[in-house]
Each structure stands twice: as C-alpha cells, then as structure tokens.
Amino acid sequence: MKSLAELEQLRNKTLARVNLRKEDDSNIRVVVGMATCGIAAGARPVMKALMDEIEKRNISNCFVTQTGCIGVCRLEPIVEVYIPGSEKITYVKMDAEKAVKIVNETIVNGKVINEYTIGAAENN
Amino acid sequence: MELARGHVLVCGGTGCTSSGSAKIIEEFENCLKDKGLENEIKVVQTGCFGLCALGPIVIVYPEGAFYSMVKPEDVSEIVEEHLLKGRIVKRLLYQETVVDEDNVKSLNEVDFYKKQQRIALVNCGVINPESIDEYIAFGGYTALGKVLTEMKPQEVIDEIKESGLRGRGGGGFPTGLKWQFTANSQGDKKYVACNADEGDPGAFMDRSILEGDPHSLIEAMAIAAYAVGADQGYVYIRAEYPIAVNRLRIAIDQAKEYGLLGENIFESGFNFDLDIRLGAGAFVCGEETALMTSIEGHRGEPRPRPPFPAVKGLFGKPTLLNNVETYANITAIINNGAEWFKQIGTEKSKGTKVFAVGGKIKNTGLVEIPMGTTLREIVYEIGGGIPNGKKFKAAQTGGPSGGCIPADLIDTPIDYDSLISIGSMMGSGGLIVMDEDTCMVDIAKFFLEFTVDESCGKCAPCRIGTKRLLEILEKITSGKGTLEDIDKLEELCYSIKNAALCGLGQTAPNPILSTLRYFRDEYIAHVVDKKCPAGVCKALLSYVIDPDKCKGCSLCAKKCPVGAIEGVVKNPFTIDTNKCIKCGVCMESCKFGAISKK
C-alpha cells in the first residue's frame, strides 16, 4: 500500500459490490418484476442486462432487486426505479437493450425515458 | 468479487457454526446452482450477529430479511421463494421483525438491536471476515492511512487520551495513558501485544470480534505500534478458539499481501509485523505479566508489578498490551474523532461496552450498549426478560473476578465506577442472569471451583487460600456449616485479596464477598435452618409426597432409579429419605403435582 489514493481506489472498486448491505436510504433501488408472468415475458435477461451495465460502469449508489407480480402482467417485464427524493418510475415491456438505456439515462443521469414508462404504454 | 443482486449472509460465528451454519452455506450454494442463480446471488459467511439464541441466523440483502433458527431443509424454500421469486418467507423470519401480513420492520427497530450502538462490533455480521476487500469497502484501513500520512505519534496518543477510552479487558485503565507510558519508555526495541486470551466463563466478545472483523484488530495494532514506536506485535490467543485463529491468520496474510503489514507502510517509513502466539487456555494467562511470560515461551506464571509492561514487558522491552475490544474501538476514534467518541457513554466511562449475555434470559447473545445503560434495559428490553415467567434475582458481571448485582440495584447505570461501587466489576463483559431458582451460595461455589482449578500455584494466598474458601463453601452447602464458618470465610476473603500476587488471586474472593453482601440471609439459611431457599443444594433438600394430592398411581415409584418410593396402589405413596438420591425424577413425573422439594 503506497498511498491514501491507492486505498481509496481499492475501496471504490469494491464498494459497488457491498453497498446493498448498508442500510442507507440514499441508494437508487431498481426493482424487476420476477413472478411467473415476468419471467415468462423475459425478465431474467432484463435483470442480467441491468446488472452487467451497472457493473461495467461501476455504479456504487444503486442496487438491483426483484419483486413478485405487480398486477399488470400484460405489460411485463416491468422495471421500477426508486430514486430517493423523487417519484417512482415504472418502465414496462422491457428488454435487454432498453435496460441498458435505463441504466445510462435514468440511473446515471437521472432522466426519465418517457416512451418506456407505463404512462406512455397506457396511452397507446 | 462479482456484482450480485442479492447477498445471503450466513453467520459463521462459533455459536451458529456449532448449530450447523456450515451445512446451511453448503445447502445455499447447491440450491442456488440448481436454480442457476449462482452468479446473481452471493453467499457470504460473516461473523456473529449477536442474537446467538436464535441461531443459525441468515440475513438476505438488499431486503434485510432476518431469518432465524434456519435448518438445512429450509434453505430450498428460501432460495425458491425469496431469491427466485422475490417473496420473503415469513414463516422463517425472526418474528419480532414481522409487523403484519405485508410489512417487515428493519432490524434496527427490533427490541434486541434498538438500544444497542455498535462501535467495536460494527462490522460483525456485516462483512465477510475473510475478505480484506470487503473490510476496505466498509472504510477499513483509512484510519491507519490517516495516522501514517497525516499525524505524528504524539497526536495519535493525544487523540486516544482525549477520547476517554478505558481498557475493555476489565481493569478500566485509561488507554491513552498506557500508550503514553509506553511511548515515553526508552528502549531500542518496543512491542505491542494484544490480549485475546478471554478466559472468563461466559464471555465471548473478543472471540466474536476476531471471528467477525479480524482486520480491525490488525489495523488498530498497527496504529498503536506507530504511536508508541514499536515495529513488532503479538496477538496472544487461546488455541481453543480455532475459528478465530484461522480467520486472524488469513487476515494477517492478506494485510501482508496488500502491504498493510510489513515495511514502509503507506510510504511513511513505518514498519510493522504481526505474529500470533497460541495459548493453552489457562485462565491466569489473561493476566498481563503471565501472558507475556507465556509469549516468551515460559510457563505462564505472573510476576510482581512494578515494573509495569510499559517499562519492562516482553523480552524485557517496553510493551503495550491491550485487550481485543479496546483495540476494536481505536479505528472508530481515529476516523470520527475523540469529540464524537466522548459524547457516547457517561462522564467517566466513554463509549460502549460489549456484553455476552447468558444464563436465565430469553435473548442470549452478544450486545453492545452505550455505557450508562441500566441493567434493567439489558435484561428486560434487549434481553427480552426471564423465560418461564420467573423472577429476576441477580446478575453476575465480571465472571469469577466480579460480583453480583441484586434485583434492587437493577436500575444501576452500567459503567466502570458504578459497578465497582456496588461491589462488582465490569470485567471483560460476561453477564450471567440468574432467576429465583438460583442459589447464591452455590454460584459462589461454582466460581471458586473455577479459580481453584485455574490458580497457577505460584503464590500461597491464591493456591491454598482459594482451596480453603471452596472447602468452607462445600461445608455450608452440604449442611454442615456454622455461623462461625461464615465469619471465617469473610475474613479469609480479605486476607487473600490483600496478599495474592496477581489479579486472579486478588479478585477470586469477589463472588463470595458480593453474595455475602447482598444475600447473607441465604448463607444463614444454609447454616442455621439447614435449608437451601432456592432448592438447589441437594444435601439440604428432601422430596416429600403430599398425601392429599397423591392418587396412588405408582408412576413415581416406577421411575425412581433407586427404589426409594413405596406404597400400595390407590393409596398415598411415601419416599424413604435414607434411600433418596434427590435426583428429582419423581417430581418431574408426577402428573398431580403431589411431590415437592423442601
């Protein structure tokens, strides 16, 4: 160990992998619907894509988790993003490609991708 | 380490390991593989969560679901329901965390954890103790980095002094002052050492820190070495703690690999190396001079002080010796500052203390509370009260060196000085709760048996004196004692206290003195009335059958192992007290409550 900076670097590298254990409300929570309906509609590759992208970009303030059936099975796979201090965003009819976009736009930049939201889907 | 969406934390402390947590980890790994989840969910073996009574414990993050008393056959259900489908298995949750059908409250809001504040145990049950990366991710080694790159040794000592930290091994000596003495001593070579010999029956916080967060000890010892000018450290740990020894070994190897032990750490020119020395588990080796004699390779016997270790310690060189829990507070003080630490606790006892709570209490386990918390809060709020609706009688703190706190002092705030003032002591933090069925003379006898066994035999007051104390206690509990014996017992206690060479002998009479102080009437009942009020001392008991309640079913006579019960069916039976061995089987077997002990 040569310097504090080196230690900090090491710390940041691992932080993303353990922060889901910290009871910290400032983290972004990404919830994937993984009931039978969700899995059948392809929730698993969506979740995989979310995690791969988060890992690739080494995002440390966010974790991915899963939930049961949300109730709108026809719109699965569904991904909900909880950003502390703002309203929940519900993305529907997800696929792996869209999932990557969510990470880049919503999680990193805090921007809502309107066309993927449940509001947009219901208006069609 | 891969990014995982869920972490399954399984307690790998000694308590949960002995109730089968290793098997649970194996089951988790197998079930996850079956479901193809092995790359998404990570199984982590951690240190002790504290709630040992409910082990084996499994916590699943990010939900923070706290599963208790998990059996290997429950694992597939947790994997299938919780990890695959995201539905928490309510049935297996620690029921205190369940609010209603849909809501689960955070662990920190549960009675057991609510009043606790974790400083020494902060990482226990949170990180994988065998991963230096996780320790670093949770802020590890930043204190060492800060000390080596930004602080002078004297500044470090001043910070510790200012914090008011006192030795957690039991003595309560101000830690900063000890560091100062060692730093001031002249010597071409100095040592730092850690007392991990934890000998008090019932105390296991040092073991849990080593098992759950070994790097915190390594980091703190390196900081101490820098502050006092040492370059070599020893951890003296009993061989009876195999899990702790193993994890500490792994941690030391990792720290060496990362250059956090060794030469020129953080390019500061500071060198520090750390070695483990195994003890054979003798109680006296927890005494500092005996401990150092043992590290040197000699028979573990104490020697008179002064000279104190700070002047002439290991191999005749100035040595700093602290206990594991004391070291476990150091990094928090450096990271957060002495001012922060000072705000926790009471005027003369700062910070927190870890207690191993055992005996007649619902939530046995490990708790860390701010100094000044009352015994009532520990017993009734954190501990969940006494099982089976029994009454609280007393609590023993400080193990064989301490004393008891009776029920009428249950509101005493717990800190070093208030415990001394009521005739007990903090000790290393064993806290044994006793209910109304406990005989206080018997308890004193139990602790004396321990000290007689563990006396090293070097000085006569301890070797001969404790044996005589035990003989008098045996005389009293067997119904042959006299009032004179009680006076003799007390007198001998004071002689031993004054004359014994080391802490073991000087404190050995404490359990007798404190039970005499608060429960003298029980001693008197034993010698005058020849009765044991709690119904424990066998020689003073007799089992009797109430002829009005006895239906003459003959069950007790059939169960009696020595054939002491006779009678004719459908008529009241009788017990022949000459034959009776007072095993109590008859009382347990009677369906009509006709048998009682007097």
Image: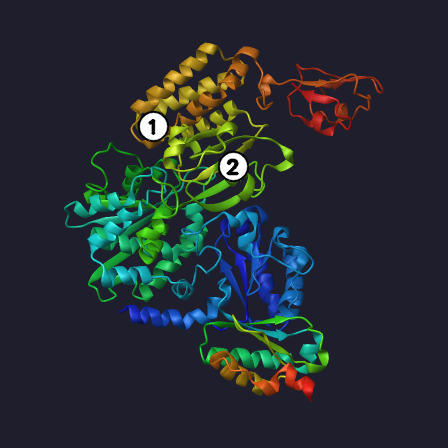
Front residue of this view, candidates B266 and B480 = B266
Q: Residue at x 44, y 23 (%)?
A: B512
- Where residue B400 appears, as percent x and y from the top left, is 43, 32
Judged left or right of residue B320, residue B380 is right
Circle number at residue B308: none
Q: Residue at x 45, y 73 (%)?
A: A60
At label 1, counting other C-alpha atoms closer than 10 Å, the crowd grade (few under 14, some 14-19, many 20 or more) is many
**B374 is higher (above) or lower (below) than B498:** below
Question: The C terminus of chain B appears in which quarter of the rendering?
Answer: top right
**B153 is higher (above) or lower (below) than B86:** above
- What residue occupies the far bottom of the structure in this picture? A124
Residue placed under numbered mark 2 in the picture:
B376
Residue B298 seen anywhere in this rendered image of the structure: no
Task: Kindly identify which chain the residue marked by label 1 belongs to.
Answer: B
- What residue occupies the far right of the structure in this picture? B570
Task: Kindly identify which chain the residue marked by label 2 belongs to.
Answer: B
User: What is the CA distance from the residue labelled 1 to the residue labelled 2?
Assistant: 29 Å
- Where residue B144 appears, as percent x and y from the top left, is 29, 60
Q: Amino acid at mark 2?
A: Arg
Judged left or right of residue B173, residue B523 is right
